[in-house]
Image: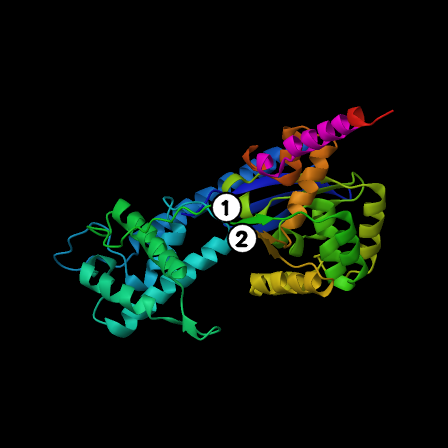
């Protein structure tokens, strides 16, 4: 069975609803109750019932699994064609977002296709031997990226290898293979050679002035909330509580792991902008076209925003061998610094930005720089001649 089911209750137009989340998917369910306590109780009963059904389904699938071949050296044989499904449903895999799952699926599928083409006689994962792994590594290093017409980079090769190493660690854990033949590549330690720059107020104004439609809305949401690109592109109207002036979202990156919501307050001017935007919308999403693009190919929306920056002359630059990068994530740093400069506590900033701990805040906290600048100004004042 996959990740556990999580849920929360909320009201909309005087009615109670429960929003459930499982494996990156969300669904709202109407509740026939009058109070928050009754809504919480019904939500918990529904989660318990759904969890029991998942356990029953998993047990049934296990009973109907492919029988072990004769003289099978392992306890739970796994078909090579089912490798991704086994990985996805394993309780032993690391919790990760939709983007990482998509990468795992692609990397495992490339290997499964290779075995199908080059070693059609292999059926089960435990039949894989070191010689075949070495052959696949040679094949992988000569694989061509169809978009660039070049062989894939060593970094990409290592990502494929590490994904397969993790997969076979899971198979080893559940007694589906007798050995993990995949090497574990070490990620080389690199010195910080680039910095993600924050946007200035002037740059944000330029972006807003030069865009319209959903691109303008995407920029506005980034400036207002500091959300990651995926959360902004897939933001739903029912995540915005207009009466309480609050946006409540479960971040796509960390939601499957923690289920924790981010609560983002909205000012009067911003709520008026969102109300006007909603009055013209016929979709459940704030940016429906960009949402569809993101869910199909998340890099496409990143390219769209890169064009917005390029059109107004905001581009990454190098200084002294150090790269200064701009992207949608720059909004995240901009908003974090803005909250810290407003004297919000780390705990408050953490809740607004949706982080599970305060570690990330320290990356963006420019307090030492601000203190130094303040001290510099005071020193300069003392140095003035009367």
Depth check, front residue: 133 or 335: 335
Tell me the magenta residue range: 361-380
Q: Residue at x 69, y 29 (%)?
A: 371
Residue 376 falls inside the magenta stretch: yes
Tell me if residue 218 comes above or below residue 5 in the rendering: below
Tell me if residue 379 comes above or below residue 165 in the rendering: above
| Residue under pointer 1 | 192
Q: Residue at x 19, y 59 (%)?
A: 130
Q: Secondary structure at mark 2?
A: loop
| Residue under pointer 2 | 321
Q: Residue at x 84, y 54 (%)?
A: 276
Q: Secondary structure at mark 1?
A: loop
Left or right of residue 49: residue 384: right
Tell me if residue 376 comes above or below residue 221 in the rendering: above
Q: Position of residue 268 (x, y in %)?
A: 85, 42
Q: Position of residue 209 (x, y in %)?
A: 81, 59
Q: Residue at x 64, y 48 (%)?
A: 197
Labels 2 and 1: the sequence-earlier one: 1
Of tags 2 and 1, the one toward the viewer is 2
Label 1: how many Cα within 10 Å (few below 14, some 14–19, many 20+):
few
Q: Position of residue 293 (x, y in %)?
A: 62, 65
Disc 2 and disc 1: Cα gap in Å?
11 Å
Residue 228 falls inside the magenta stretch: no
Left or right of residue 299: residue 164: left
């Amino acid at each position: 069975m996959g990740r556990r089911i999580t849920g929360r209750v909320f009201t909309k137009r005087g009615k109670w609803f429960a929003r459930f989340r499982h494996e990156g998917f969300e669904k709202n369910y109407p509740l026939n109750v009058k109070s928050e306590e009754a809504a919480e109780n019904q939500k918990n009963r529904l989660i318990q019932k759904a969890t029991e059904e998942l356990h029953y389904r998993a047990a049934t699938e296990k009973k109907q699994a492919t029988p072990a071949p004769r003289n099978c050296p392992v306890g739970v044989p796994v078909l090579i064609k089912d490798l991704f499904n086994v990985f996805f449903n394993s309780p032993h895999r690391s919790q990760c977002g939709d983007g990482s799952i998509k990468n795992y699926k692609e990397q495992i599928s490339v290997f499964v296709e290779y075995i199908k083409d080059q070693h059609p006689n292999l059926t089960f994962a435990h039949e894989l031997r070191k010689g075949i792994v070495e052959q696949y590594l040679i094949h992988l290093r000569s694989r061509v990226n169809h978009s660039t017409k070049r062989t894939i980079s060593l970094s990409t090769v290592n990502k494929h290898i590490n994904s397969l190493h993790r997969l076979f660690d899971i198979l080893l854990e559940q007694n589906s293979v007798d050995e993990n033949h995949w090497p574990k590549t070490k990620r080389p330690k690199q010195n910080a050679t680039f910095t993600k720059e924050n946007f200035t107020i002037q740059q944000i104004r330029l972006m807003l002035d030069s865009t319209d439609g959903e691109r303008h809305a995407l920029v506005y949401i980034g400036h207002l909330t500091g959300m990651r690109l995926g959360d902004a592109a897939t933001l739903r109207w029912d995540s915005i509580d207009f009466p309480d002036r609050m946006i409540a979202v479960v971040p796509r990156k960390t939601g499957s792991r923690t289920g924790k919501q981010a609560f983002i307050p909205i000012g009067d001017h911003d709520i008026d902008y969102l109300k006007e935007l909603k009055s013209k919308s016929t979709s459940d999403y704030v940016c429906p076209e960009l949402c569809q693009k993101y869910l199909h190919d998340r890099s496409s929306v990143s390219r769209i925003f890169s064009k917005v920056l390029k059109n107004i002359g905001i581009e990454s630059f190098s200084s002294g061998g150090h790269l200064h990068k701009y992207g949608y994530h720059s909004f995240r740093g901009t908003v974090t610094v803005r909250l810290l400069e407003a004297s919000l506590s780390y705990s408050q900033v953490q809740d607004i930005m949706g982080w599970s701990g305060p570690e990330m805040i320290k990356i963006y906290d420019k307090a030492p720089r601000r203190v130094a600048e303040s001290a510099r100004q005071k020193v300069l004042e003392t140095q003035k001649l009367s």
